[in-house]
Each structure stands twice: as C-alpha cells, then as structure tokens.
Image: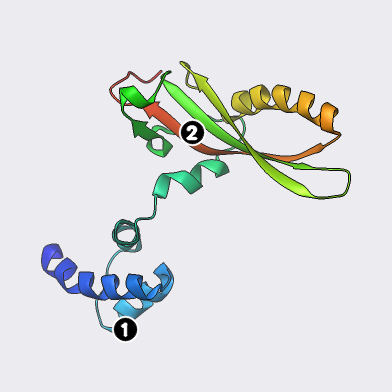
C-alpha cells in the first residue's frame, strides 16, 4: 500500500523540489491532491530528493550539559579521521567597531564529549584571541560532529 502511494507522491515531490518549493508548500500540495503521508516520512523523502543533510543543523540545539546523540553524528571512513571523534564549533566575535565575524574551530578527540566540554576547550583558545585582537565572544555553537566509522562508541 505504502509503495503504491510513494510511487504517486514521488513525481509531485520531485517537481516541487525542482521548482524550489518549501517542504511545507509541497506537503500542502500533496494534501490538495488527496495524497496523505506522515509528515516525518515526507520530510525524510523531501530531504533525500533535495540533497539536504538532516544531521548538520539540529546538533546546534543540543543543551550545554548534554552530549549530542549518536544519530546526530556523521560517520566518516577511517582514512578521513585521525581520532575517533571530531567536533566543529562556530563562534561569533564582535570587534571594537561592532562588526561580527564567524570563525570555526575543530576539536579532535578520542572521547565522547558534552557540548559544554567542547565549548570550554574552544573558549580557552578563543580567550587568547579575544585579548590579542580586543574582540568580544558573542556566541558559540556546535555545527557538526563526526565519528570514525567502525569504531566503538563511548
């Protein structure tokens, strides 16, 4: 039953994705055609067709005291990873004139870490930079998390 419905839905979703329609507009269009689908399943399909990476954006909302869940990590082959984990954090700084600049910092480790631990490491490095260039740290977010494929999780 679902496979037949997906076969009906796919051409409409492909056309809407090619036109640049948003996920909500596309879902509305499907419902107008009488083709219902669970929102979660539809978003999964829509992301696949548009080539949108699900994991990258949601990790930045993990609270400081928690470690990101495993499904938020991108698995990379052993050749691409020197350590078991790699976290990429973005931090924004403001200079004396009020200009905001985004910078990125990568933390490589063999330990599964909480967001707070990552931010403490980057924060200690950024403090030297702040003093040297008289900048003020505004915000710090985890942008991506990578795990070496085939390695055990802590």
In the image, taking residue 28 as reference, residue 142 lies left or right, namely: right
Q: Which residue is under mark 1?
A: 32
Say how many tags the image has. Answer: 2
Q: Residue at x 47, y 33 (%)?
A: 145
Indicate the position of residue 148 as horizontal and vertical percent values.
36, 24
Q: Quadrant of residue 26?
A: bottom left
Of residues 19 and 13, the one nearer the viewer is: 19
Q: Residue at x 41, y 19 (%)?
A: 84
From this view, report whether residue 143 is shown above or below residue 99.
above
Q: Is residue 89 left or right of residue 32?
A: right
Residue 31 rendering spot, x and y as whole percentages: 31, 78
Q: Which residue is mark 2?
A: 68
Q: Residue at x 56, y 44 (%)?
A: 61
Q: Residues within 10 Å of mark 2 (few under 14, many from 20)?
A: many
Check disc 1 and report its element: helix, strand or loop. helix
Q: Most extreme residue toward the front, as rendered?
A: 133
Q: Quadrant of residue 81?
A: top left
* Separation (CA) of disc 2 from disc 1: 38 Å
Colour scheme in the image?
Answer: rainbow
Q: Quadrant of the N terminus?
A: bottom left
Image spot of residue 75 (x, y percent)? 34, 32
| Helix, strand or loop for disc 2 | loop
Q: Are marks 2 and 1 in contact (CB under 8 Å)?
A: no
Say which residue appears at 34% left-offset and 31% top-offset.
76
Determine which quarter of the picture holds residue 43: bottom left
Residue 114, how many percent across, how many down? 55, 26
């Amino acid at each position: 039953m679902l496979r037949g419905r997906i076969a009906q839905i796919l051409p409409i979703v492909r056309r809407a994705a090619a036109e640049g329609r948003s996920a909500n507009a596309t879902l509305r269009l499907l419902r107008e055609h009488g083709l219902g689908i669970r929102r979660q399943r539809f978003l999964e399909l829509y992301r696949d067709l548009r080539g949108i990476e699900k994991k990258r954006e949601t990790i930045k909302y993990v609270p400081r005291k928690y470690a990101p869940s495993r499904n938020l990590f991108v698995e990379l082959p052993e050749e691409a990873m020197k350590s078991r984990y790699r976290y990429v954090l973005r931090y924004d700084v403001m200079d004396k004139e009020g200009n905001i600049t985004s910078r990125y910092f990568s933390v490589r480790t063999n330990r599964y870490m909480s967001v707070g631990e990552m931010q403490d490491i980057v924060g200690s490095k950024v403090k030297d930079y702040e003093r040297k260039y008289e900048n003020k740290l505004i915000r710090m977010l985890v942008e991506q998390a990578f795990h070496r494929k085939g390695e055990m999780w802590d």
